[in-house]
Amino acid sequence: MQYFLCLAQEGNVTRAARRLNIVQPALSMQIAKLETSFGKKLFYRSAYGVSLTAAGEKLAELANGLVQNAESVKEEMDRLDGTISGRVSIGMITSAAQSTLAASTAEVAAKYPEIRLSVFEGYTETLMEWVTAGQIDIAIINVPPTKTSLSVHHIVDEGMMLACAAGRPRPKSLSFSNLNNMDLVIPSRRHGLRGILDTVAAEANISLKPRLEIDTLSAICEVVATTELVTILPGIALHPALSAGTIQAHRLRKPSITRSVAWITHPRRVVSTAMAAVMEIIAHDLKSAAASAARHVSR
């Protein structure tokens, strides 16, 4: 199964064999045995490489979970000796990654030296696709408005805040409906946070017309800190700038806006001890960042 998944990812027998540190004939023989045992063709072959058939795509979907669970079994057996080890891959939305990732990963490295951690940034929809396909173990996302078949583990609910440069006079109105009278810098429509804002705007029968659209949230905070523009972001995203004193935040009213952050896993994927240990640290840091940001909000 590992050979099959490697070839599926590489799309080329030479590259896959090199990555697996075996000779090409050995890889081809194992794939042939696999096709014979299933009685189905798993790859289309061409002069340019290989690609999955419909049967191959289905096997890749199933095999990811099997291989990952096999690794989890070994990790759990290692834990009997008191060692928490294993490989953990996590996808994170930008607002979480840019706020607490450095501190969280440093703590994981210090506390669990046997854990090999890989972290990737992405949008909520993309991260959900990666978890579904078995490409990553865990994703930290904005909870989507529609139901999902993935396992959802709640982390924190937090308010979206109106932020402007430190020392600037408090906005006359903190009503969401008054945002059209402000110079806004917010994420683009590709971003999950923009989806939350657009949904509330539609319900309030207004259309957001930002001066700037930037998906890098730390850049938004820098723009706000040095200009007359304002933004609407959740506390976790604003936390570093609020702690540095470069911006100030105000709670929005009529209506207030809340976003929920959660971590998700595939329902057929065993949550290993290593995965749980990593998420305990990351979830704690995210909750702390949200609480710290809430304490900075001007009343």
Image (cartoon, helix red, strand yellow):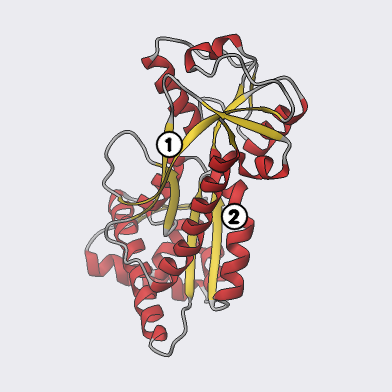
Nearer to the camera, 175 or 97: 175
Instruction: Please name the residue that numbered disc 1 is placed on.
Output: 259
Q: In the displayed image of the protein, which residue is found farthest to the bottom?
A: 81
Above or below, 24 relative to 89: below
Residue type, label 2: Leu
- Closer to us: mark 1 or mark 2? 1
Label 2 secondary element? helix
**Residue drawn at (54%, 78%) of the image:** 114
Q: Quadrant of the C terminus?
A: top right
* Lower sequence index among marks 1 and 2: 2
**Residue drawn at (48%, 17%) of the image:** 176
Image-quadrant location for residue 119? bottom right
Label 2 crowd (10 A; few <14 / some 14-19 / many >=20): some
- Residue 238 visible in image: yes
Above or below, 200 relative to 130: above
Nearer to the camera, 20 or 274: 274
Residue 216 on image: x %, y %: 64, 36
Q: CA distance from mark 1 to mark 2?
A: 19 Å
In the picture, the disc for residue 135 is none
Instruction: Please name the residue that numbered disc 2 is placed on.
Output: 101
**Residue drawn at (40%, 22%) of the image:** 199
Left or right: residue 186 versus residue 54 is right
**Residue drawn at (34%, 74%) of the image:** 70
Label 1 secondary element? strand
Above or below, 17 relative to 184: below
Left or right: residue 188 versus residue 205 is right
Left or right: residue 243 versus residue 257 is right
Left or right: residue 39 versus residue 60 is left
Residue type, label 1: Arg
